[in-house]
């Protein structure tokens, strides 16, 4: 069986300073974990061919298929607020781009594909844990309607990877995205005074993501709006990205780089899971503000393209970034109205939502299950202390009465029944590390059909001895 991938590469045609051409580093003994057959079909790739020995060799980086033009992308970024002028793909290789039968252009990238000139002190590899985590979480996010990179496949390498815990089984994730262009990509050129590079990148992004944007200012407006919608989706699911650096802020408005990410169990506004976020910079309730901060960095890169008069450019860019809060608040309110079954709009809905969130925190409610149970009138079952919720409930009942009852169908297609909870993901990783993929497959099936009641157990929050309090980067 011959594998054919219909590559149509555009990023590689940008000048050499945008990337380094490099093939993936072969591995010892690749083995298949999973091929996302539905996504392969969307890309115009035969899933069976991907599952063949030739396909697995491509997915592991042992064979470069016809039409690929592999490269590592250059970018910079603010990491936890600290500036790093050169980051880049330190363990990822972009094989190329595919225009699928639906006409959408997507990148195909191998994560864990070996060292590149951007690797710094890293080994360029990944172990099976973060590969399993990203596969599960990114596919769950897609199933819940959140713009995201996706997992096309995962393979083992047959080689141990040395980490602090000791040797771990190596793996490679094949990631698909509308692009891998980040705010940090723009910062890389802006920091070097390479205005031509910024302009070429802006033109590329406009053609690829926002063809309706004719100017740099319109591009900024479009990215601001996309990020507002994205962060509202995260907040509506209790999702915490964990590492919202500018190099992880996708200009196309997709969720990218699932490192120390997590979905909350018990609701807490200041919840942090990332082991490296010591001061809560990227806490749940901090995410909208950080998104605006990242957008301000993006706007700074575009200033020379917005207006020759720098003061005028700053004024216009500031106005654009200042549109983020109202756009985000509108998207947030629309999301939470749907979660509450509110098909109409009232002025006090914002306060109603905020007061529910406060009641959830006071009552130590399970975020996902409390919202899911609202349509059946059993949300109180997921509160440790029911009193705050019961004090809020009459206002909600009165609000529903004014619109003629809750839109329960809307609620049930907005509030998931199954999410990739930390303890379940961890159990799947532990099993996969030992070669048992059954828990991974079972959890994947549940979270990729998230609005259907899952098999018993998948909807349950962790027992006290199952709580995963810290998540880790995948490097």
Image: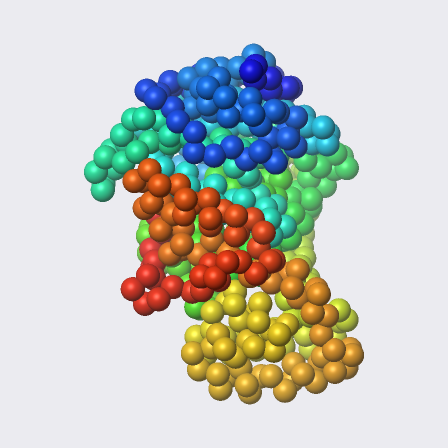
* Nearer to us in this view, 141 or 217: 141
Locate the C terminus by quadrant: top left
Tell me where residue 152 appears, x and y as whole percent: 53, 33
* Nearer to us in this view, 54 or 335: 54
Q: Is residue 341 above or below residue 436?
A: below
Task: Specify whether residue 253 is in view.
Answer: yes
* Nearer to us in this view, 433 or 320: 433
Tell me where residue 83 appears, x and y as whole percent: 41, 40
Tell me where residue 120 appears, x and y as whole percent: 33, 28
Tell which residue pokes out farthest to the top in this image.
66
* Total numbered circles: 0
**How is the protein colored in the picture?**
rainbow
Q: Quadrant of residue 115?
A: top left
Answer left or right for 295 relative to 265: right
Locate the N terminus by quadrant: top right
Which residue shows up at 43% across the image and 68% down it?
266
* Nearer to us in this view, 141 or 355: 141
Answer left or right for 214 relative to 328: right
Which residue shows up at 65% across the image and 81% down it?
396
Task: Specify whether residue 289 is in view.
Answer: no
Tell me where residue 122 appears, x and y as whole percent: 31, 30
Q: Quadrant of residue 38?
A: top right
Q: Is residue 255 above or below residue 99?
A: below
Which residue shows up at 38% across the image and 24% down it?
30
Q: Is residue 215 above or below residue 133?
A: above
Which residue shows up at 44% across the image and 56% down it?
421
Q: Is residue 349 above or below residue 279?
A: below
């Amino acid at each position: 069986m011959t594998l054919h991938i219909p590559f149509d590469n555009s990023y590689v045609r940008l000048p050499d300073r945008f990337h380094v051409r490099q093939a993936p580093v072969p591995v010892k003994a690749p083995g298949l974990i999973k091929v996302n057959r539905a996504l392969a079909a969307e890309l115009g790739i035969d899933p069976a061919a991907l599952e063949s020995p030739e396909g697995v060799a491509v997915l592991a980086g042992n064979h470069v298929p016809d039409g690929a033009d592999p490269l590592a992308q250059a970018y910079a970024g603010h990491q936890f607020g600290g500036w790093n002028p050169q980051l880049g793909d330190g363990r990822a290789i972009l094989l190329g781009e595919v225009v699928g039968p639906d006409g959408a252009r997507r990148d195909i990238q191998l994560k864990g594909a070996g060292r590149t000139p951007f690797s710094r002190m890293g080994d360029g590899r990944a172990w099976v844990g973060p590969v399993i985590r990203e596969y599960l979480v990114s596919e769950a996010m897609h199933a819940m309607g959140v713009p995201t990179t996706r997992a096309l496949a995962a393979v083992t390498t047959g080689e141990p990877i040395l980490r602090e815990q000791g040797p771990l089984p190596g793996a490679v994730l094949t990631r698909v995205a509308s692009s891998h262009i980040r705010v940090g990509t723009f910062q890389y050129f802006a920091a070097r005074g390479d205005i031509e590079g910024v302009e070429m990148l802006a033109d590329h992004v406009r053609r690829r993501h926002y063809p309706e944007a004719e100017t740099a200012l319109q591009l900024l407006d479009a990215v601001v709006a996309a990020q507002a919608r994205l962060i509202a989706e995260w907040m509506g699911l209790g999702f915490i990205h964990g590492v919202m650096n500018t190099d992880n802020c996708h200009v196309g408005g997709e969720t990218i780089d699932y490192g120390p990410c997590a979905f909350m169990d018990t609701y807490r506004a200041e919840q942090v899971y990332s082991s490296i976020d010591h001061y809560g910079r990227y806490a749940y309730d901090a995410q909208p503000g950080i998104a605006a901060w990242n957008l301000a960095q993006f706007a700074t890169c575009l200033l020379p393209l917005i207006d020759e008069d720098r003061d005028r450019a700053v004024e216009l860019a500031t106005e654009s970034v200042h549109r983020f809060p109202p756009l985000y608040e509108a998207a947030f309110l629309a999301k939470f109205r749907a979660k509450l079954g509110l098909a109409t709009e009232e002025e006090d809905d914002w306060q109603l939502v905020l007061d529910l969130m406060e009641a959830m925190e006071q009552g130590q409610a399970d975020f996902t299950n409390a919202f899911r149970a609202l349509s059946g009138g059993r949300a109180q079952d997921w509160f440790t202390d029911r009193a705050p919720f019961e004090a809020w409930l009459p206002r909600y009942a009165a609000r529903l009465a004014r619109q003629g009852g809750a839109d329960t169908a809307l609620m049930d297609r907005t509030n998931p029944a199954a999410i990739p909870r930390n303890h379940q993901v961890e159990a799947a990783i532990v099993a996969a590390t030992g070669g048992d993929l059954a828990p991974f497959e079972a959890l994947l099936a549940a979270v990729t059909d998230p609005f259907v009641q899952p098999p018993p157990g998948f909807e349950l929050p962790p027992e006290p001895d199952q709580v995963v309090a810290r998540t880790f980067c995948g490097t």
